[in-house]
Each structure stands twice: as C-alpha cells, then as structure tokens.
Image: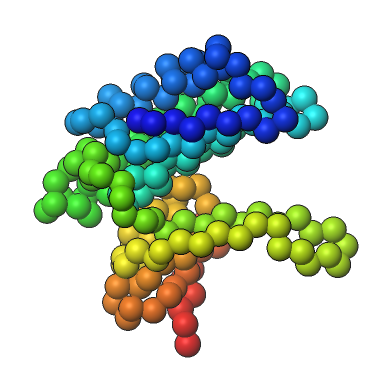
Amino acid sequence: MNLSIRGQQIEVTDALKDYVDKKLSRLEKYFDAPLNSDGAVTLSTTRGLHTVEVTIPLKGIVLRAEDESDDMYASIDSVVDKLERQIRKHKTKINRKFRQEGSLKTLFVEDPTGTVATAELDTETEDDDLEVVRTKRFMLKPMDVEEAILQMNMVGHNFFVFSNIENEEVSVVYKRNDGKYGLIEQG
C-alpha cells in the first residue's frame, strides 16, 4: 500500500512515518494480495490534541477512520484498531452480497481505479456566515440501497450519495436519530 503521510501543524518525523507504516501494514493480513491502493494519512495537532485520519480507497469501498487523543502514537494505534474492526464488521455483510462474485478479500484486492462515491460534510458556521469551506467532486457509483447503506457505515458517515441502480437517479441514504435508515430520492 502506498501511503501519503502529511502533517497539519506538526512536523512528520521519520519515526512517525515508520510507526504509521508499521501499524498500517497490519491490515494487509486481511487481503489475499498486497494492496495496490494509495492511502492518505493526515496527522494534526490542535490545542494539545493529536488527530490521525486515515483514508484508504479501494474498488467499491473506502476504509476510513479518525481518532483524537493526547498522544499521537495512541491515536495511530486507535485508528488502526478502528480500521480492523471496520473490516471485520463489514466483511460478513458485504461477503453475503458478493458471494457470487467471490469473497470480500477478492473485492478488497482488486485494482482501485474505480471511483467511489463518498462525501464529507464539513461545516463551520458562525452566526449567519454561510461560507462553503470544502467542496468535493466525485463520480457516483451505481448501486442498490442496501449496498449504499453498507458503504455509508463503512466510511463512518451519517449520509451517503449514490446513483440508484433501480431508477438511475441520484439518491441519498442517511442514518436517522432512531438508528434506522432513510432514503432521499429525486422527485
């Protein structure tokens, strides 16, 4: 796996790079072949809190985790643990869906050239300031509602934009406050 490690308000030392590489290499045991994806690791420090964010795009899915603590090394450990739990949690669910096409390991190993629909909502509103602080563009992957919910849970967001394979329209699934899911379709 090719990792792009960058720091925000922190110098990324060789020791930190080595530690991140060593810890994230633990994820390779979940795959049949070495990962050919380009992962992004962001290390940042704000008001004494150390934040680590890891995003690994693969064909059809995105592995993403974030953690914040008082110690950078503890944050790295926690993020890797979250990624491992995420893989194990969704392995059975996704494997059921793709049983005809092969195991989840096969799904993860394929070349990640496909673009995956994922979105982040970063809002910084102060009083009535409605400034857009982040814009993302992405290709929408055709999928059914169940797969969209799995993808949403995989990336850890509370909504997910996708191209609904049933009606070929842009749709959004979201997690409701009662723990169930909602679907927004074009009308």
Question: Residue 132 or 105: which is nearer the viewer?
Answer: 132
Residue at 36%, 49% (x, y): give it. 61
Q: Is residue 104 visible?
A: no
Tell how many labels: 0
Q: Is residue 37 visible?
A: yes
Question: Residue 117 or 95: which is nearer the viewer?
Answer: 117
Q: Is residue 100 above or below residue 170?
A: above
Which quarter shows the N terminus? top left
Q: Is residue 89 above or below residue 5?
A: below
* Residue 81 percent coordinates (x, y): 46, 27
List the single residue furthest toward the bottom.
187
* Residue 23 percent coordinates (x, y): 44, 19
* Residue 53 percent coordinates (x, y): 56, 35
Lateral position of residue 95 relative to residue 1, left or right: left
Q: On the image, which quarter does residue 2 sit in?
A: top left
Lateral position of residue 100 relative to residue 11, left or right: left
* Residue 15 percent coordinates (x, y): 55, 12
Residue at 35%, 64% (x, y): give it. 141
List the single residue furthest toward the left.
100
Question: Residue 97 or 108: which is nearer the viewer?
Answer: 108
Residue at 38%, 56% (x, y): give it. 116
Question: Residue 110 or 169: which is nearer the viewer?
Answer: 110
Lateral position of residue 110 relative to residue 181, left or right: left
Q: On the image, which quarter does residue 108 sit in?
A: top left
Q: Is residue 4 above or below residue 177?
A: above
Q: Is residue 1 above or below residue 94?
A: above
Residue at 83%, 65% (x, y): give it. 129
List the single residue furthest toward the right.
127
